[in-house]
Amino acid sequence: MITYWHNPRCSKSRAGLALLEERGADVQVRLYLQDAPSVAEIKAVQAALGVSAVQMMRTGEKVSKDLGLSKDSAEEDLLAAMAAHPILIERPIAIKDNQAVIGRPTEAIETLL
């Protein structure tokens, strides 16, 4: 089972989901903008990705600038911001067991298949 944090308005997210469906993967889609992950869930995905919080963020989003976030912000502040404003989470993210990948490029998702 692959859990897929999906934003249907994003072309990369749609492409990643199409790849998974074409490959016949068992996918559970999570519309993370409507069903925001908790700080604990984001931390677990961060650990599975093996990246810093800022590396899994969309730092160019207006809300990031409005909150005064930067690459120098504390990890806990970045994680809390992503939980409060899920638009800040890079998309898409595919999660399988203790592994996760950001689907940029889309082909990165193939590592979970």
Image (cartoon, rainbow, N blue to C red):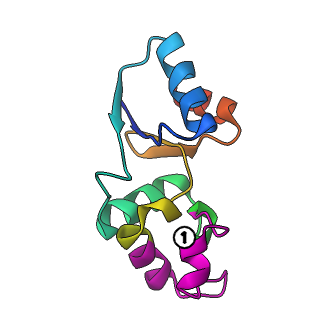
Does the magenta-highlighted stretch encompass residue 77? yes
Q: Amino acid at mark 1?
A: Ala
Residue pointed to by mark 1: 53
Q: Which residue does the image show at 36% across and 20% down from the upper left?
A: 26
Q: Whole-percent x and y of residue 7?
A: 47, 43
> As displayed, is residue 51 above or below residue 18?
below
Q: Nearer the viewer, residue 35 or 53?
A: 35
Say if 49 sits above or below 113 in the image.
Answer: below
**Percent from the top left, x then y, of residue 21?**
47, 16
* Magenta-drawn stretch contains 62: yes
**Quadrant assignment, res 52:** bottom right
Find residue 60 and report its image quarter: bottom right
Mark 1 residue crowding within 10 angstroms, few (<14) / some (14–19) / many (20+): many
Residue segment shown in magenta: 57-81
Residue 20 horizontal/vertical position (percent): 50, 21
Which quadrant, please, contains the N terminus? top left
Tell me: residue 99, above or below residue 61.
above
Left or right: where 34 falls relative to 21? left
